[in-house]
Amino acid sequence: MVGRFGSRAATAVVAMLIAAAAAATVPAHAEPEGAPGSVVTSGPLVREHWIPDAADARLVTYWSTGPGGRPALSTGAVFIPPGQAPPGGWPVVSWGHGAVGLADECAPTATGVLGGGYLTRWLTQGYAVVATDYVGLGTPGIHPYLDGRSQAHSVVDMVRAARAIVPSLSRKWVALGQSQGGQAAMVAASLATSYAPELDFRGAVGLGVPSNIENLAPLGGPGFPELPLTGTTVFISYLLAGLRATRPDVDLDGYLSPLGREVLDRAESLCYLEAAEAFAGISIGELLSRQLDDPVILSALREMLEIPVRGYDRPFFVGQGMLDEVVPAPLTLKLVADLAGNGERFTFRPYPAGHLGTMRLSLPDATDFVREAFLAP
């Protein structure tokens, strides 16, 4: 496949062999398993990785609940606003980031790409910001991209871990996420009060939420058409690589073409921009050797990807860019219609923006929503 990937393939193979050899010397569960949210290590975050205007920042490794309900480690960062904490402590915004890749070096706390000015806007309004990397990014195992429950657990347990190392944080918190993090925030909203009843969950904001992908899965196969979207092959390769790693009972390789297996192998070691370059010109159909129509794999994908459309007990906010070429608006509109049909209490706002632009345009509405959520009795 030199024609596809060029000379970088040899370098990547060497890097993967070195990483595999290093990983073989460290047991996958080197730390004794702890309760969700329990802290394994903590310390100062590298100063260059701080959100602008933070008064302090801490790096933490903590236990969470990964795919299949199994204990898993995650890392994350805690950012403290300037000034004195209000009575009851700093209210907490738990941030879920968008897709960065599957490799450990792609983790936001490793790269320092932690939301920058956008998260500063929340920090300067008097919220402590906690930001998970999700399980598998900077911790053992392959990151299970778009495994909604795993990501949601990381978001919730990040609050628990942050409060354990920073006593000035309040029990009150909201989930906030964009793209992959939007899915994490939505799923977190569906389980937060039962999963972490000792906290005071107030609501969630999900922006550019990838939804209804599981309903498109039966169409997946060698003849899947080219889509006029951005990054789709990368995102699907991440999704399938995560599923392959976390569900060995599903013979995913049996659905992949030789090119598809090579792409997934490489996807495990590439951050998003590298993967976008390496996989340019490769379609989703080229990854597959046969139709994804087996009930076993469809059930596994649904369990991984599905966002609940009923059963929420706190308000939430959904923002969608109508010009989004990463998460197309029709998928979100179906999610919104299903939620409304089930009588859920939520706010939906469309914006004349693309995927990332929705974060900026939605900020005033999301700010009002979060403020009201914290003020609610």
Image (cartoon, rainbow, N blue to C red):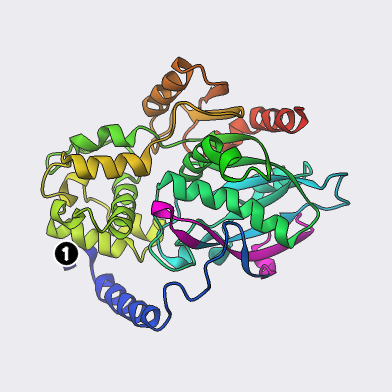
Q: What residue did someone put label 1 on?
A: 3
List x then y, in percent, for residue 278: 29, 60
In the rendered image, residue 63 lying in the magenta stretch gets the answer yes
Residue 121 found in image quarter: top right
Q: Report the quarter where the N terminus lies.
A: bottom left
Q: Looking at the picture, does residue 249 appear above or below residue 119?
A: below
Amino acid bearing label 1: Gly
Residue 260 found in image quarter: bottom left
Q: Report the quarter where the C terminus lies.
A: top right
Q: Looking at the picture, does residue 326 appear above or below residue 43?
A: above
Q: Nearer the viewer, residue 246 or 110?
A: 246
Task: Write the residue at 64% across / 63% down.
Answer: 49
Task: Write the residue at 69% across / 33% down.
Answer: 370
Is 247 positioned to the left or the right of 335 in the image?
left
Q: Nearer the viewer, residue 9 or 106?
A: 106
User: From this viewpoint, is residue 98 visible?
Assistant: no
